[in-house]
Image (tube, rainbow, N blue to C red):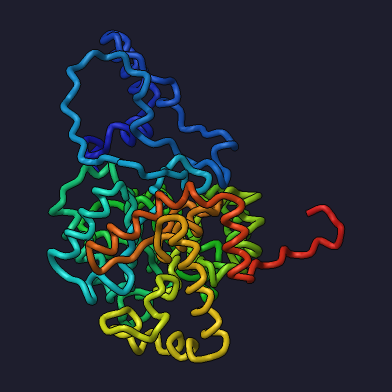
Amino acid sequence: MSSLSLSPLKHLATASPLYIKSCRSSITASRTTLPASLFSTQATASQFTAAHLPYTPRHRLFSTTTVNMAQPTVRSAYDPKDMKFRYLGPTGLQVSVFSLGGWLTYGGTQKGSIVKDILQTAWDHGIQTFDTAEIYANGACEVEMGQALKELDWPRDEYVLITKVFFGTGRKEPNTRGLSRKHVIEGLKSSLQRLQTPYVDVVFAHRPDVGTPLLEIVEGFTQAIRNLNLAYYWGTSEWSAQQIAEATRLAEKHNLIAPIAEQPQYNAFHRERFEVEFKPLFEQFNYGTTIWSPLASGLLTGKYNDGIPEGSRFATNKEFFQNTVNSLQTDEGKAKIEKVKKLTKIAEKLGGNTSQLALAWAASNPNVSTVILGATKIEQINDNIKALALLDKLTPEVKEEIEAVLDNKPKPTPTFNRER
């Protein structure tokens, strides 16, 4: 490959000392000041920790230039409204406290202009974080969301895009699923083609892969980020705390990039893993979370209090939710329905509804970075976003009232009077 085809940074990194010296002279002559770090390929050990990614974003390399140039017009399409933002784990990436996901909706029951309309509605309410995965509708979700984003034409630096790899797109050929280095790279490249974008902000390992060495998994995601520029960060989904901690230790030991966030299920009826098992991750690594199923697949909306209404998720995805539907006929399921009815009364006293209360409750946990919403209709987005108003109303007294209804607060892991 000719040196002329290299980017400026790669050209400098491979050039001779004499050439670099001539570049410095030329730059000095033009009264441009560039940081000395541009000419150094050395990195300090502190760069390679779980909290600091082992590379410097390119746009920061030129932050000290003193060249006077006319500023281009900056196009902005985003208005945050009253949205709240949180950092995603140990990074500087900010995500809206409520985000929008495409699981079981886009590319499946919802296609075409409605997907674009729902994304636009979410955006209008301040949501700037969007979640999908290669497996959702066997890749069709990424196609639908990618086309919608292309048509909406928002500035790419104004929104956060997330996808996930592991399950593939329903194909059965070897290496078309899992977390081998091959599928991490090729699966992500395929996702980007469907999304019609050169990169995603975060790529998640959708499940742990016990058949692939953990070191290879961390190496694969590091290559996707550091060498191929296919993503900025990577995370885990439904991994155990032990697996996440080990991946982080391997990253530190081998000068690789550590995961920064987990995507777990978390809601008022599903708490144990998030609140107990993951607690050390929050304390030790400031690990981020993008939680799914905050409404317990709709159970916490109150719509199933009197049966399965037509057009509901349990009705349109009967086979997928059959076990959940059957569980509602058990004593435990009936007890949950009664709890939802009591939560509805609390929500109404606060000026909201059951869905909004459940979403606000999940978002009130400081270890939640963003709550992923699902919507098949514009009206659902308009309704769910009102949870923002309830968030500030969840006083300690209100939370105690909610806990009294739920009566399922997980017990902390016993320490046997020893310091953790």
Using residue 173 as the reference point, say whether residue 244 is left or right of it: right
Q: Position of residue 176 (x, y in %)?
A: 35, 75
- Placement of the C terminus among the 4 image quadrants: bottom right
Q: Quadrant of residue 21?
A: top left
Query: For the point 46% across and 63% down, which residue is it?
Result: 358
Query: Does the rendering let one see residue 3?
Result: yes
Using residue 195 as the reference point, say whether residue 367 is left or right of it: right
Q: Position of residue 99 (x, y in %)?
A: 36, 55
Query: For the point 38% across and 28% down, which residue is it?
Result: 61
Query: For the point 23% across and 13% down, which residue is it?
Result: 68
Count of labels in the image = 0
Q: Quadrant of residue 250?
A: bottom right
Using residue 176 as the reference point, say whether residue 289 is left or right of it: right
Is the residue 24 above or below the residue 190 in the image?
Answer: above
Is the residue 95 above or below the residue 411 in the image?
Answer: above
- In the depicted view, which residue is nearer to us: 405 or 61? 405
Query: For the point 27% across and 75% down, which residue is it?
Result: 137
Query: Does the rendering let one see residue 179?
Result: no
Q: Position of residue 60 (x, y in %)?
A: 38, 29
Q: Position of residue 371 (x, y in %)?
A: 43, 58
- Placement of the N terminus among the 4 image quadrants: top left
